[in-house]
Image (cartoon, coloured by chain):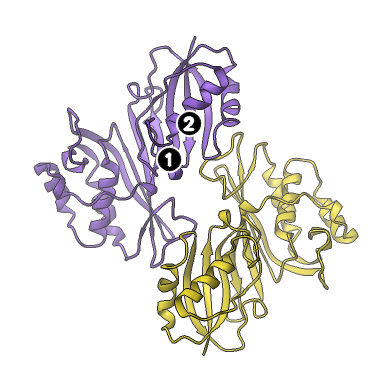
Chain colours: A purple, B yellow
Amino acid sequence: MRNIKIEIEYDGTNYCGWQIQQNGITIQGEITKALRELTGEEITIHGSGRTDAGAHAKNQVANFILENNIPTERLPLALNGILPGDITITNAAEVPVDFHARRSAIAKRYIYHIYESKYRSALLRNYSYHVHRKLNHSKMKEAAKMFIGTHDFRAFMASGSDVRGTVRTIYESDIVNKGKSLYIYIKGNGFLYNMVRIIVGTLVEIGLGKMQTDWIEQSFEIGDRAMAGHTAPPQGLFLDKVYYPADSL
Amino acid sequence: MRNIKIEIEYDGTNYCGWQIQQNGITIQGEITKALRELTGEEITIHGSGRTDAGAHAKNQVANFILENNIPTERLPLALNGILPGDITITNAAEVPVDFHARRSAIAKRYIYHIYESKYRSALLRNYSYHVHRKLNHSKMKEAAKMFIGTHDFRAFMASGSDVRGTVRTIYESDIVNKGKSLYIYIKGNGFLYNMVRIIVGTLVEIGLGKMQTDWIEQSFEIGDRAMAGHTAPPQGLFLDKVYYPADSL
């Protein structure tokens, strides 16, 4: 019996998100099925966290307890041979029994891709948020920096979410512009439901001149979801990396 | 009556290539249909050239004669509203009556994307050629340079092709490495059928150590398709730009 940590890359376009559900195809569901086919075992996979329908992962992490004695290093190829092409196991490693993909995680990094152009992109339609008006990049960069640090992110959480604490620490929040693409990099010790997408929606509204940068500070203070910007669409969102105690932040 | 030049971006994943055909959905067919729906006219679209099933275009060029008096600058949005999301008209301009997207073209540039990794990429599966073994980049760069200049490319053409001349001039042939991606940039005054994909296949075989760089020179001299490498798959291929006399090469 081994505790196996896997890393997964996926194109979320055709999935109802990470988390397994009764109706709808999910990433977790497909991997569970592939493990069942490979080993005959009914295995519970623990992901580092959910991702939304249509959102992607360059590197999601999960773990599960395996009875089967297939060599760990053979798992990626064996599972990839069963999984559909839009889900790939990129690594597998045996980890200590107390490792848990969600509970052991100390930070996560996301990349959000905005495509700024008069016309939509055919090639990037499933991998970016198309904004057809000009964005003020320097205002957005200034605003992005204001998320760094420890704040109460209650205003940046989908309303109706049920969580105990809403204070999170953001380590990195930056915007890089390449051609018509704006990449927002955000790393923190944890994220509330829809938090990255609401932060991006807020940055877009600031870039369009609809909101002022000081609204961010006010949103932290007042903590009302209505203060922050809209929820940016899922297809621009990529889970980039999950950090564990052994990783340098 | 106007001669209209359009620029088109497309994701070729779900198409049987550019050229209209009886059975199978094509880019040219979809644009013809959209123009019919918009104008009621039966319009013949002239593309700068074909692209293969599964291959993409960042910037394909086409022209057609339009009777309808819709303002030229309104064409992209009007057509994009009808076209599927994986085809986008990115520009439209009225051009002199003697402009012809294929006959007026003086050069084309392609980008070919190789993904070099032990495991396939879920996100890039439709946009790259997955090579799972290590490639010798410096050997490939050296080999890429050997295509520059005027050569008889008979060996780098799908066998059975029916063309008069097989001499072409290559202006640019370079390889750039970013992470696990290798981008091959190739610009020339014209390309034979499958020529870019056979050049890439040859570069990959050189990168794997299966072929020597001096085989390229020999392939030019002997002109036998069997001398050159395999035909790299279509999904890594992007038509990047079509050049006309007004463009600087």
Task: Assess disc 1: are there few (<14), some (14-19) or many (≥20) residues with their C-alpha within 10 Å of its C-alpha.
Answer: many
Q: Is residue A60 visible?
A: no
Q: Quadrant of the C terminus of chain B?
A: bottom right
Disc 2 designates what residue? Answer: A30
How far across and down, in percent of the image, does residue A96 sit?
A: 44, 13
First reached walking from the N terminus: tag 2 or tag 1: 1
How far across and down, in percent of the image, does residue A88 sit?
A: 53, 34
**Which quadrant of the figure has residue A247?**
top left
Q: Secondary structure at mark 1?
A: loop
Task: Assess disc 2: are there few (<14), some (14-19) or many (≥20) residues with their C-alpha within 10 Å of its C-alpha.
Answer: some
**Which quadrant of the figure has residue A29?**
top left
How far across and down, in percent of the image, does residue B24 sit?
A: 62, 60
Left or right relative to B209: residue A171 = left
B193 shown above or below A227: below
Marking on residue A15:
1
How far across and down, in percent of the image, does residue B97 sit?
A: 58, 89
Q: Nearer the viewer, residue B39 or B113?
A: B39
Q: Amino acid at mark 1?
A: Tyr
Q: Nearer the viewer, residue A109 or A1?
A: A1
Q: Chain of mark 2?
A: A
Kindly identify the residue that appears in the image at 35 percent across and 30 percent down.
A49
Question: Is there a contact, CB below 8 Å, between mark 2 and mark 1?
Answer: yes
Q: Secondary structure at mark 2?
A: helix
B220 shown above or below A194: below
Kindly identify the residue that appears in the image at 52 percent across and 75 percent down.
B6
Left or right relative to A214: residue A178 = right
Q: Amino acid at mark 2?
A: Glu
